[in-house]
Amino acid sequence: MLTRLVLLVSLAPSAAGRQQRHRQERRHINVSVVEDADDGCVCSAFSGNPDGCCTDKGGHETCHTWFTDEPCGTGTRGKYCCNSDFTSKCCDVNACTGGCRNSLQGSCDCKAQQSFEAVGFNESLAVRSLAFNAASQCDAAALRAWACAACPNSTRLVDVNITDAEGHVAYAGYDAARDAVVVVFRGSLSVQDWIDNLDILKVAAYAELGCVGCFVHEGFLKAYEALAPGVAASVTALLARYPGRGVALTGHSLGAAMAAHYALRLRLVDNVTLAGPVYTFGQPRVGDAAFAAWHSALFPAWFRVVHWNDPVPHLPPSDVGFAHEAREIWYDEPSDAAVVCDGSGEDADCSLSVAIALVFDDHCSYMGHRNCQCEPFSQPFAPQHLAPPVESERRDERDLVLNPDVGGEIEFF
């Protein structure tokens, strides 16, 4: 029997529960850059309490709690304020632990993190990869001529070839500026439809390539397999025309999951070199923990860029046996700051620390750019949901449970 994944909400929470939930939800909404009404100061981008910092007479940012004031940027104290209702810390880096964003369940502290340079994350190359993803949403004829609305001259590709199979699309072309063949797997044109029909079925895979006992999401694998022959033929032709080049691989949403599968073929079957790090955006979980560990070991420079509370990286849920590969790069709501997450793939202080938003603004906006429709890539993102979602529209990943009585897709209530 197929199973359906259901987001459940208590129909009659207690008054105390509602109050606690409300306070927790406040921690998750628009906390990235909020000015204190009295002083005009700005908390750390990842601080949980936007009213918890102020500026003293000397111009130093100060962390406020109910019990203490801690002046930051003085003596040995860091300059960034990480603050919750009950604890506060002055930090050296603009990153806070998840407890800051959920002070009723955790303790606020500074989050230790590595720099972009230390882990090899190149923000310029990430934006370039994002531009290719935005272009994938455009009409095939315009994309092939690199004349689409989301095809800027700064990321021009030539010899573009498009593969379209069973409703899925990928394209490949040559990037002269990077001197690499680029392969882009398109995400679903309708994110809502994709999530509404997302099942949780797993299938054994890649034992023949060394991943014994590994399971992956069946739907993602089937989507990739539909495109694989055409994409492989395109890449073979491009590498014949541009010999010795590597392949720059990327994808957004469902496309990111398909890119994870294609990377395995490139390296382990076709013996093709990847052209530097891989950048994906809004990537869902592709397989189980064994697959995630194996994939991470093969591709240590795989970067999953996540925008604040994009719901898609929370799916399929870990509670039903799925896991992320490393490494997450987590951007705040306005994409002004980012946290380099740990190498586990499931860093509790990154996107796992905020509630899932059941609107898709953050999924369709990455690094300050629109990416879900064929729009000019340089055009900044303008949210369609300016008011904070009401409490009933938001869920934590822990609210995802199995209902065995109905058939196999995720459903939001």
Image (cartoon, rainbow, N blue to C red):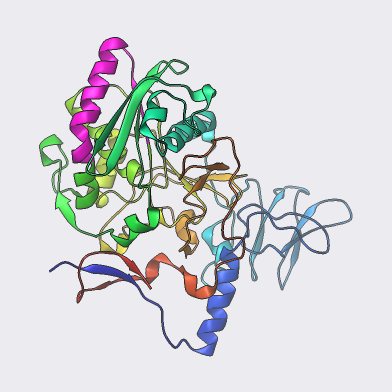
**Which residue is at the front of the view, 373 or 66?**
373
**Residue located 54% across and 29% down the image:** 124
Report whether 200 appears left or right of 357. Answer: left
Report whether 328 appears left or right of 59. Answer: left
**Residue located 53% across and 35% down the image:** 116
Residue 44 in percent (x, y) is at 66, 53
Report whether 81 appears left or right of 346. Answer: right
Q: Is residue 198 visible?
A: yes
In the rendered image, the vertical position of residue 323 relative to residue 120, given as above or below? below
Q: For the view shown, which residue lies furthest in the left direction?
A: 208
Q: Is residue 242 magenta?
A: yes
In the rendered image, the vertical position of residue 211 relative to residue 71, given as above or below? above
Dominant secondary structure, magenta = helix
Q: Quadrant of residue 32?
A: bottom right
Q: For the view shown, which residue lies furthest in the front direction?
A: 141
Q: Is residue 19 magenta?
A: no
Residue 16 in percent (x, y) is at 54, 87
User: How many numbered marks does the figure carry?
Assistant: 0
Report whether 31 appears left or right of 319. Answer: right
In the rendered image, the vertical position of residue 23 relative to residue 367, given as above or below? below
Residue 119 in percent (x, y) is at 47, 34
**Residue located 15% across and 45% down the image:** 205
**Which residue is at the front of the view, 115 or 26?**
26
Segment colored magenta: 224-250
Residue 252 in percent (x, y) is at 39, 42
Q: Is residue 243 visible?
A: no
In the rendered image, the vertical position of residue 145 relative to residue 24, given as above or below? above
